[in-house]
Amino acid sequence: MSALFAPTVPRLAALPPSRRALEIPTSPDRPVLTARVARLRGAGSMVRGRISRLSVRDVRFPTSLGGHGSDAMHTDPDYSAAYVVIETDAEDGIKGCGITFTLGKGTEVVVCAVNALAHHVLNKDLKDIVGDFRGFYRQLTSDGQLRWIGPEKGVVHLATAAVLNAVWDLWAKQEGKPVWKLLVDMDPRMLVSCIDFRYITDVLTEEDALEILQKGQVAKKEREKQMLAQGYPAYTTSCAWLGYSDDTLKQLCAQALKDGWTRFKVKVGADLQDDVRRCQIIRDMIGPEKTLMMDANQRWDVPEAVEWMSKLAKFKPLWIEEPTSPDDILGHAAISKALVPLGIGIATGEQCHNRVIFKQLLQAKALQFLQIDSCRLGSVNENLSVLLMAKKFEIPVCPHAGGVGLCELVQHLIIFDYISVSASLKNRMCEYVDHLHEHFKYPVMIQRASYMPPKDPGYSTEMKEESVKKHQYPDGEVWKKLLAAQEN
Ligand SMILES: C[C@H](O)[C@@H](O)[C@@H](O)[C@H](O)C(=O)O
Ligand SMILES: [Mg+2]
């Protein structure tokens, strides 16, 4: 269902001045706002226009019909997105598109949350937003009424990500650069000004962040060239969804090997005997040298995770992903302590609420591979803080991708990370899943099992209008047919 927001009179205008002050969460550093805007202008920035319109649509793909995306906890996922488009009055016709990844019915709840946040964006000058991005991020995440159903977690945070992803897309399009390049070229002080450091200054201060980013400037040009020539290494999850038959698994694995893939992820966690059989098939097919990862999608309690993985250790997995609840930091630490001696690392992050939980996972030595997600955290802004914390703790970042659009988005973050932050490819790779790219205007490009840096301006978030129309729920052609068939 589509919800459209025409320009409205700002809600604040109706309030007496005394209340207005209460309604606007002040930016931590509003006094330097003008300095930042000046810096933007000084950098020859092209930023322009006032946000005049925001629309959000519920777009769903019936992936559950083929068992695609299935795991031990999500047995029938319909890959979906709350798809946000923002427009400005700048008359250049450029729109910012943002998504957040959801599953089926969850989308309608996220769409409501985007609508509830829309007034923070409407009638704002893009220049003011990006000139004080930290302040704007905090305005969205500190809404005095909406933060009660977060804060910075769950539905309201997914919605924040969709909105901010659209802002980043708009900004990068206006600058004529892909987001990764916008970030790589950005002055480190400006990058730092996009991050909300609240709650993480015990491990990462603004000064620490600046120092990391300044060090990252060294040999940056060479790393950029390297990325453009070779791309960022990827692994595939496409062969081994839990709902696939052994025949499908074998067929897809054979094809992936032919296509040059060397790193594979298999879903586990529902039934031990099934896991043993499927892991044996895949290990036999890929041989002892290629990399295998396992993903339990939060299925186990802590002792169960250790016991189960001890039985799968013979298949030499590099990591077990989400062995238990994503909120259980100490549980992850305990599992890590038990499994690292067996050569198995812990990976987690696709359902990690925010930078605070990532901070604690790092502090507690609860993970060996950190999986950022472009749509679960508060967009580029919050992801920047996590990339910098991971660098400080020297933990490799291996982003979560797949779903619908996650590969398109996260490639920008990890390419930036390599060029400007980590400067390392050791133990690093980005997830790839071969679904639904055809619905995007600027789909990812994979060559030799690597992500080739996107060249089109923006965040690669724009979907093809005909795909959106067809898959909108429940009125799109695809869903009308499916729903009618269900009734008969
Ligand atoms: C429901 C989804 O497909 C998940 O299974 C998927 O994101 C997965 O955890 C992954 O790591 O790719
Ligand atoms: Mg996973």
Image (cartoon, rainbow, N blue to C red):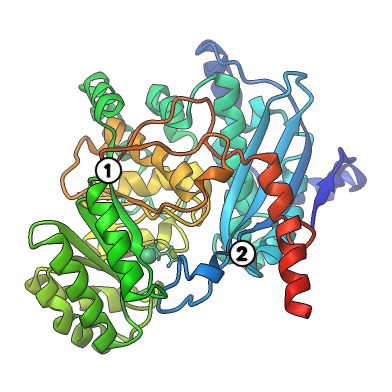
Task: Residue 335: give x, y in percent of width and height.
Answer: 22, 77
Q: Secondary structure under badge 1?
A: loop
Q: Is residue 167 above or below residue 40?
A: below
Q: Which residue is mark 1?
A: 449
Horizontal placement of 31 versus 329: left or right?
A: right
Q: Nearer the viewer, mark 2 or mark 1?
A: 1
Ligand 1 located in image quadrant: bottom left
Tell me if I can see residue 140 in this picture. yes
At x 17%, y 75%, the residue is 280
Q: Which residue is mark 2?
A: 155
Task: Residue 384: give x, y in percent of width and height.
Answer: 41, 42
Q: Secondary structure under badge 2?
A: helix
Q: Nearer the viewer, residue 182 or 142?
A: 182
At x 31%, y 77%, the residue is 268
Q: Nearer the viewer, residue 133 or 265?
A: 265
Task: Residue 475: give x, y in percent of width and height.
Answer: 80, 59
